[in-house]
Image (cartoon, helix red, strand yellow):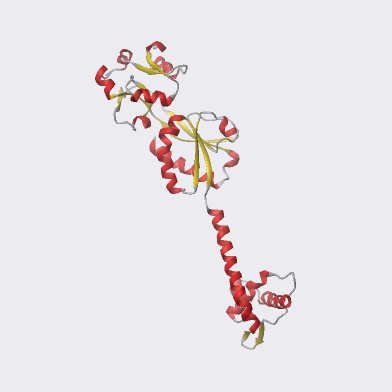
Amino acid sequence: MKQNFDWGLVRSFLAALDQGSLLGAARVLDASQPTIGRHIAELESQLGVVLFERTGRGLLPTASALRLAESARAMEAGAHQLARSVSGAETAISGSVRITASEPVACVLLPPVLARMRQALPDVQVELVASNEVTNLLRREADIALRMVRPDQASLVAKRIGSVKLGAFGHRDYLRRKGTPRQPPELLQHELIGGDRNEEILQGFATMGYPVERGHFAFRTDNLMAYWAAVRAGLGIGFVATYMARTDPDVVPVLPMLPLPELPIWLTVHREIRTSRRIRAVYDFLAAEVPQVL
């Protein structure tokens, strides 16, 4: 047997053995009859044996061919298994995906969505980073981001997937103690929860025509999870996303007529990593599911 044995010829050998003729093997393999004949002759030359006797009725396998057939079929089975393994590796979606989002989105909005994604993509592990820094994607510290502002970096691709509705809310215990405001001006007689250095709520009151200053806020914090905890604890009336308020039945809306803005939510990914099937699958899942819980 020559050292440069061509294992690729085994396929033609098995087809000829199974079909009993060069013509039948050629049809099965979608090749020409002369090509199959050359393959058989080359295999016989490499093995140094005669594999078939040519008769008027076709090919008659020799004892050497029958001995070779068992090993050849094992090789064929191995080749098919290898093809299936490679195909599975190409189609499987597995590995880690790092997602960054603001604290409220990361702590309240995403967990039930990620629980459903775990069922849909069981081989994907999620790393969740609670942060508002756009630079997380630019430094490749995260794969996907959910943000309330659209990034302007050319290397990032953003898709608006919905809007976050805001509302004024108070805990039932607070409202029992202090009463429920019926008109917007009555807010100024209530204990309010506001920002510390962040002036967005102050600006919101100014837009509505109410002269509110930091001193009007009975409790101030820029940490949004601490802010939400203060509302739930009954420290006063605060302004939170409706998706957060829905998680506590004891926190109820007040003054639904307030003209509060809706915040767009953007799903952002780095342009160069959109080609990753793993990241693409998570990106598509979030794009479809997050709007359902806003």
Q: Where residue 16 sits: x, y (%)?
A: 62, 78
Q: Give the number of marks.
A: 0
Specify whether residue 199 is in view.
yes
Residue 134 position within the rendered picture, expressed as x and y whole percent measured from the top left: 55, 30
Please identify the quarter of the rendering in which residue 271 is found. top right
| Front residue of 239 and 155 | 239
Residue at x 56% of width, y 58% of height: 87
Q: Residue at x 42, y 32 (%)?
A: 163
Looking at the image, residue 3 lies above or below residue 177 = below
Describe residue 6's horizontal placement relative to residue 232 as left or right.
right
Asked if residue 131 lies left or right of residue 6, the reply is: left
Q: Residue 179 occupies which quadrant of the picture?
A: top left
Q: Quadrant of the C terminus?
A: top left
Q: At which x and y percent is residue 241?
A: 39, 28
Residue positioned 64% across, 89% down in the render: 56
Q: For residue 222, what is the image quadrant? A: top left
